[in-house]
Image (cartoon, helix red, strand yellow):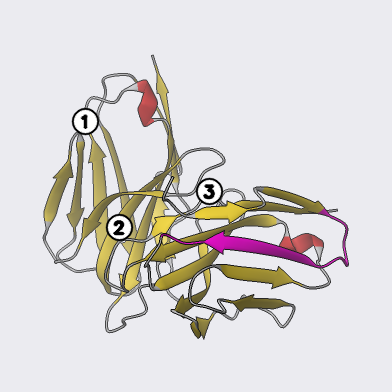
Amino acid sequence: DTGVSQDPRHKITKRGQNVTFRCDPISEHNRLYWYRQTLGQGPEFLTYFQNEAQLEKSRLLSDRFSAERPKGSFSTLEIQRTEQGDSAMYLCASSLTAYNEQFFGPGTRLTVL
Amino acid sequence: GQQLNQSPQSMFIQEGEDVSMNCTSSSIFNTWLWYKQDPGEGPVLLIALYKAGELTSNGRLTAQFGITRKDSFLNISASIPSDVGIYFCAGQPYNTNAGKSTFGDGTTLTVKP
């Protein structure tokens, strides 16, 4: 399967714990995006990378959130000191360039107890 | 920030019926996108529109980019049970190469056999 993959698919954690998600984009895709989706709503943009450079962060991305794409391939999204409001589906998408179709992964569903 | 109003919020139709849904924005978009999302999966792109007035088809699906650049429509003809899912519109703003999308809150489609 050469699509976008995300790991884990589901994560349950207690409030205050740190969590890290991984996204593996389609090979050779330069652009990688992170979105957050809550129940009954569409995905909301969080941040994006052009290769290893993080070019924009949404104001939704508080100081507790950090994303990296160290070698321009896979990316990680870390949430520190999780809060119940962080419970959501975290979606990753990749595209060849800014002007090409974004392919979404299956998402990581986070539940903070 | 930019907001997309997507309607209707949900639709319950009989198999074989045609479906129409639309999306409006308070600001101009350069690109309109329509996605379908199945439970537990990421959105999948159905149709992309790049020019005002453009009308594009993908099988039984037809979408149009509004002349004002502030709206778009998606029609599904002769619905079948596998059309069930959540349909999202998304727009990419004018004068940006970020490629990030602003999503509507979705139209949930239920098709009764």
User: Nearer the observer, disc 3 or disc 1?
Assistant: 3
Residue B99 shows in the view:
yes
> Label 2 lies in what chain?
B
* Distance (Cα) linking label 3 and label 1: 27 Å
Nearest the camera: B107 or A34? A34
Proximity of marks 2 and 3: CB atoms separated by less than 8 Å: no
Residue under disc 2 on the same chain as residue under disc 3: no
Which residues are the magenta region? A13-26
Instruction: Note whether B22 is above or below B59 in the view shown.
Output: below
Q: Which mark is residue B109?
A: none
Q: Residue at x 57, y 41 (%)?
A: B40
Residue B92 is situated, as x and y percent measured from the top left of the image, at: 33, 70
Label 1: which residue?
A: B77
> Label 1 lies in what chain?
B
Proximity of marks 3 and 1: CB atoms separated by less than 8 Å: no
Q: Secondary structure at mark 3?
A: loop
The amino acid sitting under disc 1 is Ser
* Distance (Cα) linking label 2 and label 1: 18 Å
Q: Residue at x 49, y 81 (%)?
A: A52
Q: Is residue B70 part of the magenta span, yes or no?
A: no
Q: Residue furthest top?
A: B113
Instruction: Note whether B107 is above or below A53 in the view shown.
Output: above
Residue B44 is situated, as x and y percent measured from the top left of the image, at: 38, 48
Q: Which mark is residue A106?
A: 3
Work out whether mark 2 precedes mark 1 in sequence or the reverse, and give the earlier one.
Answer: 2
Q: Secondary structure at mark 1?
A: loop
Instruction: Note whether A89 is above or below B9 in the view shown.
Output: below
Proximity of marks 2 and 1: CB atoms separated by less than 8 Å: no
Residue under disc 2 on the same chain as residue under disc 1: yes
Label 2: which residue?
A: B33
> Label 3 lies in what chain?
A
